[in-house]
Amino acid sequence: MAEKYSFPRFRTESSGRSERAANWAVIGIFLILGFAAIAAGRDFLMPVTLAALLFFVFTPLRRLARRRGIPDALTATGITLGLVVTVVLIGLAASGPISRAAENLPTIKIRLEQKFSDIRESFEELQQAAQEIEQVQASDDPEQQEPIKVEQVSESPLTSLMKFTPAIAGQVVFTLFLLFFMLASGDLLYLKIVQSFDTMAEKRSAYLALRQIEDSLGNYLGAITIINAGLGLAVGLAMFAWGMPGAVLFGLGAFILNFIPYLGAIVGVISSALVALVVMPGLFWPLMVAGSYLLLTSLEGQIITPYFVSRRLQMNAVVVFLAVALWAWLWSVIGMIIAVPVLVVMRVLADYVPGWEKFGNFLAGEDPPTLEDEDEEEAREIVEAGSVAEDEAAAREVTAEIVEDEIPGSGKT
């Protein structure tokens, strides 16, 4: 039987650099294609991701119910129906104020225009100058014709929402059905994931990672949900105290928007300011209303959430902001909501996947620990050895000078 031979590989320094450059090029191409695939498959991947996150959140509840003798299918049915009832109640509570706001939209628009009329008058001179410049440019070009004005029929926000309602409803139904089947399957998914690894150590590490994801997501989303509910109650009461219309809608909006880091609070403050401009005289009281909303969200974000959320689950603020922006670009509002939970999952996986330790440290929000690794110890030893050698060399020079002074001609030549 003839033996198979292959040419030997001669690895040089230049070839090592070229291989590393090729690896980075492949990684870059993979990331670009991955983001393109995520953006293209958003209609399918969004409900799948939401169902997976909810599965990890409700799995401890399903396991607790099983220990009490309740079948997994019955628990999955109860959780799914509970989510449906919650969504329906939120929709019913918000439908009234939203419909009234949609009916009064022309009146609201007129009042806002009246409010900003003074500001618009201050800029009239600039607008007239700009129009004169445009007229001069048009007169210099005789071939330029006036553009044909095409009347565009403006579409109401309620009509636009009705167009997207079937797609949104379909994704919600798909998410709930997928969540039901995942919960009703019991520990089957965990078993299949663990069985996909070879060694017992890898199986144990995979199972521990799954349980840690359960705990982290449950603790984070549970704490954030309770905090957001308290914030929604506080905002609703504050808007009611200010005499704002739709205080219940403001409370629900604060509860939902606060799941979106940074941007949710900004949208809430701007919305309260615009509504206050319509219903309140002057500019002072609208600023006070917006300031109260900003004060409540600031207290929540700077004091309450850092105190009640585990320090281990806190994330790097810069990474959170970039993640929210990235997922907003990919999946719009749903992407902004799932951005932080996805970071929590990646933070947990970084503790169990070999080679991801530095990535996990980059995601963490706590101050990095002061570690003394082998390289630092070796560097310190080298510095200390170098200082000792310098001291010995300096001592020899001083000794030689002393000997030269005492015994002329005995030292230097």
Image (cartoon, helix red, strand yellow):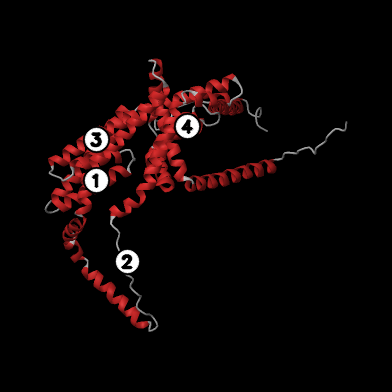
Tag 4 or tag 2, which sits nearer the N-term? 2
Q: Distance between the residues labelled 1 and 4?
A: 33 Å
Q: Which mark is residue 115?
A: none
Query: Which kind of residue does numbered mark 4 sit on?
Result: Gly
Separation of marks 4 and 3 at Cα, in angstroms: 30 Å
Q: In this view, does 146 lie to the left or right of 46?
A: left
Dot 4 crowding, Cα within 10 Å, few <14, some 14–19, many 20+: many
Given residues 51 and 213, the one toward you in this image is 51
Q: Quadrant of the C terminus?
A: top right
> SS for tag 2?
loop
Pointer 2 residue? 152
* CB contact under 8 Å: marks 2 and 4: no
Q: In which quarter of the image is residue 104?
A: bottom left
Which of the two residues, 383 or 392, is positioned nearer the viewer here?
A: 383
Helix, strand or loop at mark 1: helix
Which label number is shown at residue 360?
4
Rendered location of residue 386, percent (x, y): 57, 28
In front: label 1 or label 4 = 1
| Residue 231 - label | 3
Upstream in the sequence, badge 2 or badge 1?
2
Q: Which residue shows up at 62% across the image and 25% down it?
A: 407
Q: Is residue 219 visible?
A: no
